[in-house]
Amino acid sequence: MLVKAGFRVIGSRGSIEGVALVDTGASLTMLDRGVAGGIGVKYVGRRVRIVVADGHEVESELAIVDKLVVEGEELPYAYVVAFDFPARVRERLREEGLSDCCIIGLTTLELLQLVPDTTTGKLRKTSALLL
């Protein structure tokens, strides 16, 4: 079952919001480059190579948003990666009724103390674990 979550991304010039896919195989939250530029993310000058679902690598840019909100939990100055979402990815997200410009990764969720529950398709709050 797909896990979905309400989100809002706030940049220096605007914001976007909707319902995003929670990608349990992704470490970082991803934004479409066009949207990232439109809302005013701050690029940090570091390129990151990511592997997308079909196995090919995509070059992305590491950036910071003013605030990332997932299911009401706020994370100021969150790191995201920005790249041009392939048309087939955007189309598949839209088919599922999801935002076609944001995918939430696990690092974001860990910082917000949220975990994906694939039995319900939702996120649930958890406690931090120290070993």
Image (cartoon, rainbow, N blue to C red):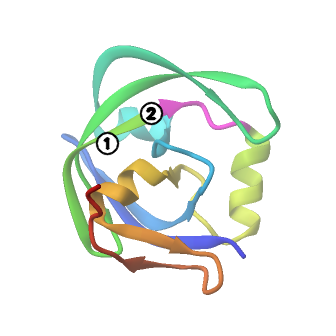
Q: Amino acid at mark 1?
A: Ile
Query: Mark number for residue 39?
Result: 1
Query: Relative to 67, is 61 above or below?
Result: above
Query: Mark number for residue 81?
Result: 2
For label 1, count other residues whose C-alpha is less than 10 Å away and answer few (under 14), some (14-19) or many (20+): some
Q: Position of residue 110 (x, y in %)?
A: 36, 57
Span of residues in magenta: 82-86
Q: Position of residue 84 (x, y in %)?
A: 59, 31
State the SS at label 1.
Answer: helix
61 is within the stretch colored magenta: no
Question: Going by the image, does 1 lie left or right of 54?
Answer: left
User: Which residue shows up at 44% across the image and 41% down it?
Assistant: 35
Query: Considering only order in the chain, which callout, 2 or 1, is on the residue closer to the N terminus?
Result: 1
Query: Mark number for residue 12?
Result: none
User: Which residue shows up at 37% across the image and 69% down it?
Assistant: 114
State the SS at label 2.
Answer: strand
Foreground of the two, 14 or 71: 71
Q: Amino acid at mark 2?
A: Val
Q: Main secondary structure of the magenta part?
A: loop
Question: Going by the image, does 59 lie left or right of 47?
Answer: right
